[in-house]
């Protein structure tokens, strides 16, 4: 994602109260291709850390409303930010001044495009042009144009694409979609009950650190094992590959305790990635709400509002 403020020391302390980890070199070298671990490419993750201001007016607070499993799969194909030329996508023909590349660090806008398509489809509205339910290249091209517009918001030429493939943030995606009048507003949270509440209506984009241990989901599609503290500590120790944005599409399993609160160890979400349909479970992965709770302030959820 590139714009997520990733504090690996804080993540380690959340996990066990004793871990003291320095940020992985990959967080800062993922654009140069140096010191990258297996599976990490120069475009999967970003390197810039941009702090997001508190947005209390858009914060969703869970108030005890009923929760149930929910599925909001976007109607467009799984996107692929890493095989552009193979898809017949020439960014020089989409964005003036851009140079054709095989891949872009545009995960924020890929996630945003998927969630935007779901929002419109669920509302019974035509998809924003030129989004298509069948043409993945057209959908990826939409995400690429959005990426260009989103990075131009910074006012800092070193964080604008083109020429710098710098990544972005979920906040900038929301602001640009409002500017283009595709959405009217958005809601934000980093708490799992509020996330489950948002998922009752629509999909949610999620920005988080992405650990090296998460590069390949297991046979069940999970990147975080059983969602327990041991698997979380193992992920933290593997190092942070970078920041990443994906689209949470389904609250697949929801277990409540006798008091009506979420049993996070026994609840999980399905999330759409943008590394092609051949990655993970048909392009998706699963993660336990317990892991998202342990990430705490290091994870960010945003839901678009029409």
Image (spheres, rainbow, N blue to C red):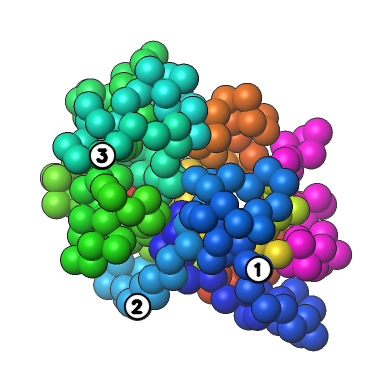
Q: Residue at x 49, y 54 (%)?
A: 31
Q: Quadrant of residue 85?
A: top left
Q: Is residue 49 above or below residue 100?
A: below
SS at badge 3: loop
Q: Which residue is mark 2?
A: 54
| Residue 200 lies within the magenta run | no
Pick the front one: 19 or 46? 46
Q: Which residue is mark 1?
A: 24
Q: Is residue 177 above or below residue 48?
A: above
| Neighbours of disc 2 within 10 Å: few (<14), some (14-19), many (20+) | few
Sequence-first disc among 3 and 2: 2
Q: CA distance from mark 2 to mark 1?
A: 26 Å
Pick the front one: 301 or 44? 44
- In percent of width and height, residue 211 lies at 67, 58
Q: Which region shows up in magenta?
A: 216-238
- In percent of width and height, residue 103 lies at 45, 36
SS at badge 2: loop
| Residue 227 lies within the magenta run | yes
Q: CA distance from mark 1 to mark 3?
A: 30 Å
SS at badge 1: loop
* Disc assigned to residue 255: none
Pick the front one: 72 or 13? 13
Q: Residue at x 55, y 35 (%)?
A: 275
Which image quarter holds the C terminus? top left
For marks 1 and 3, give the one nearer the viewer. Answer: 3
- In percent of width and height, residue 295 lies at 63, 68
Q: Which residue is mark 3?
A: 98
């Amino acid at each position: 994602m590139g714009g997520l403020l990733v504090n690996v020391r804080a993540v380690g302390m959340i996990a066990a109260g004793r871990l003291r980890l320095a940020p992985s070199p990959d967080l800062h070298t993922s654009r140069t291709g140096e010191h990258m671990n297996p599976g990490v490419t120069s475009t999967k993750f970003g390197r810039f850390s941009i702090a997001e201001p508190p947005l209390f007016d858009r914060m969703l607070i869970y108030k005890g409303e009923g929760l149930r499993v929910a599925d909001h799969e976007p109607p467009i194909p799984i996107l692929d930010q890493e095989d552009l030329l193979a898809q017949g996508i020439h960014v020089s023909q989409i964005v003036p001044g851009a140079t054709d590349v095989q891949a872009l660090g545009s995960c924020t806008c890929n996630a945003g495009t998927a969630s935007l398509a779901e929002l419109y489809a669920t509302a019974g509205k035509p998809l924003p042009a030129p989004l298509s339910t069948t043409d993945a290249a057209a959908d990826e091209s939409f995400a690429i144009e959005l990426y260009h517009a989103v990075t131009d918001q910074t006012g800092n030429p070193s964080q604008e694409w083109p020429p710098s493939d710098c990544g972005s943030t979920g906040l900038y995606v929301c602001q640009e979609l409002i500017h283009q009048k595709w959405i009217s507003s958005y809601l934000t949270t980093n708490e799992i009950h509020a996330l489950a509440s948002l998922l009752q209506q629509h999909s949610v984009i999620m920005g988080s650190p992405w650990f090296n241990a998460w590069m390949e989901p297991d046979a069940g599609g999970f990147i975080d094992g059983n969602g327990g503290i041991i698997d979380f500590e193992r992920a933290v120790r593997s190092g942070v590959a970078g920041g990443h944005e994906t689209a949470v599409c389904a609250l697949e399993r929801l277990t409540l305790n006798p008091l009506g609160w979420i049993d996070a160890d026994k609840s999980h979400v399905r999330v759409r990635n943008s590394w092609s349909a051949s990655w993970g479970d048909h392009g998706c992965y699963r993660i336990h709400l317990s892991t998202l709770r342990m990430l705490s302030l290091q994870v960010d959820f945003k839901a678009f509002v029409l």
